[in-house]
Image (cartoon, grey):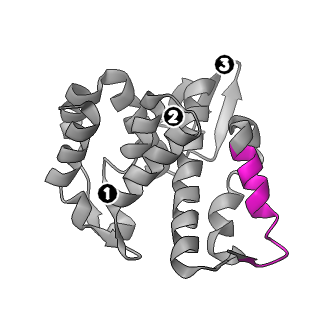
Amino acid sequence: MSTFRTVIYLLRSRNFQKCFLNGRSLLNHLIRTHQLLLKQGFPKEVAYVGLLHSFYGELKGYKADGFRHEERYLLKTLVGEDIENWVYLYHKSIEEGRLFDPFEIKEQCILGRLENKIHMSKETYSNLLNVSFLDIIEQVQFLSDLKKETKYSDFFPYLRRYSGLRHFLTESNRALLNYYFSFQKEKHVG
């Protein structure tokens, strides 16, 4: 069985296909985020982070629970230690609200100012930020398709966080961010 299919099986074992928000399952969102990353040319390792970005912790919007940190060994076995570590760093960065507040020193990014700082390379940070950005874009695209028209105010608070971090986004994602910001005056997308 392929790694992708095995990961999907693992997510199904926790009922990710039965957690719904806005009329679709969490599993659908994760797969679409993974596909978006691959379509943009990210390496499969980064695309797996997109597929697994909701693997750990409480899944607030879906009112469900992901895997516990004590179960990290499961994911390490399936996708390897490096990918699992990126998924874990992503989760910790998002969970603790640090992903959007990096402190740069040479080739390192440090998330958090006081205690429990998270250290990572700028490349890793850039990859995780791009995963987060495409996670939001996937949701914007889904809601736009669902509603046929989406108000700018529906997604601006989420996209605004990336404006000061553009230099970490890929060129295509910077263009996508600019595209969505262009709707600020028009108020509607779709």
Say if the magenta span includes residue 150.
no
The picture quadrant where one finds residue 82 is top left
Q: Is residue 21 above or below residue 36?
A: below
Residue under label 2:
117
Q: Residue furthest top?
A: 106
Q: Residue furthest left?
A: 13
In this orientation, does residue 161 appear?
A: yes
Q: Position of residue 96 (x, y in %)?
A: 47, 49
User: In the rendered image, which quarter contains the C terminus?
Assistant: bottom right
Query: Mark 2 is on which residue type?
Result: Lys
Task: Tell me the element at label 2.
Answer: loop
Residue range highlighted in magenta: 173-188
66 sits to left or right of 115: left
Q: Position of residue 6 (x, y in %)?
A: 20, 38
In this orientation, does residue 112 appear?
A: no
Residue under label 3:
107
Residue under label 1:
27
Q: How many angstroms separate mark 3 from mark 1 (CA)? A: 34 Å
Q: Position of residue 123 (x, y in %)?
A: 60, 25
